[in-house]
Amino acid sequence: MSQHVVAPTPEVAVPTIPVRELAPWALFFGLIGLIVIFFVSADQGAVSVFSGTAVHEWVHDGRHLLGYPCH
């Protein structure tokens, strides 16, 4: 009968990321996400940043994809 010899596998160290190093990036990407959602969801009305319909036309398909009424 033959015996199978299994070589030991080396342990892989998983790095840990402290919350204080992750928090600024989470805040940054959260703010970017809020800005994007604002421009996609805001109608060109009282809360519009830019006058005209340019922003509305640029994000028109995204509005429909996310379920925002537009017409």
Image (spheres, rainbow, N blue to C red):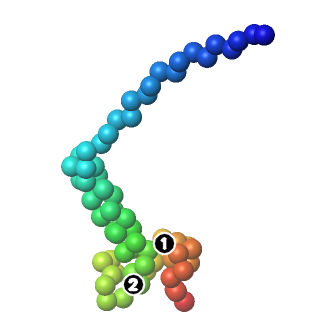
Q: Do we see residue 54 in this rendering?
A: no
User: Eyeballing the image, is 50 above or below 19?
Assistant: below
Q: Which mark is residue 44?
A: 2
The residue nearer to you, when weighing 43 against 24, is 24
- From this viewpoint, which residue is outermost toward the right? 1
- At 48% from the left edge and 71% from the top edge, which residue is drawn? 58
Residue bearing mark 1:
59
- Residue 32 in percent (x, y) is at 33, 62
- At 41% from the left edge and 84% from the top edge, which residue is drawn? 43
Type of amino acid at the residue the image marks with label 2: Gln
User: Eyeballing the image, is 61 above or below 43?
Assistant: above
Residue 62 falls left or right of residue 29: right
Q: Quadrant of residue 17?
A: top left
Quadrant where the N terminus is found in the figure: top right
- Residue 29 in percent (x, y) is at 33, 58
Quadrant where the C terminus is found in the figure: bottom right
Near mark 2 (Cα within 10 A), the count class, few <14, some 14-19 or many ≥20, is some
- From this viewpoint, which residue is outermost toward the left? 20
Residue 19 falls left or right of residue 66: left
Local secondary structure at mark 2? loop
- At 40% from the left edge and 72% from the top edge, which residue is drawn? 37
- At 37% from the left edge and 75% from the top edge, which residue is drawn? 38
Real-space Cα distance between discs 1 and 2?
11 Å
User: Eyeballing the image, is 40 above or below 4?
Assistant: below
Type of amino acid at the residue the image marks with label 1: Val
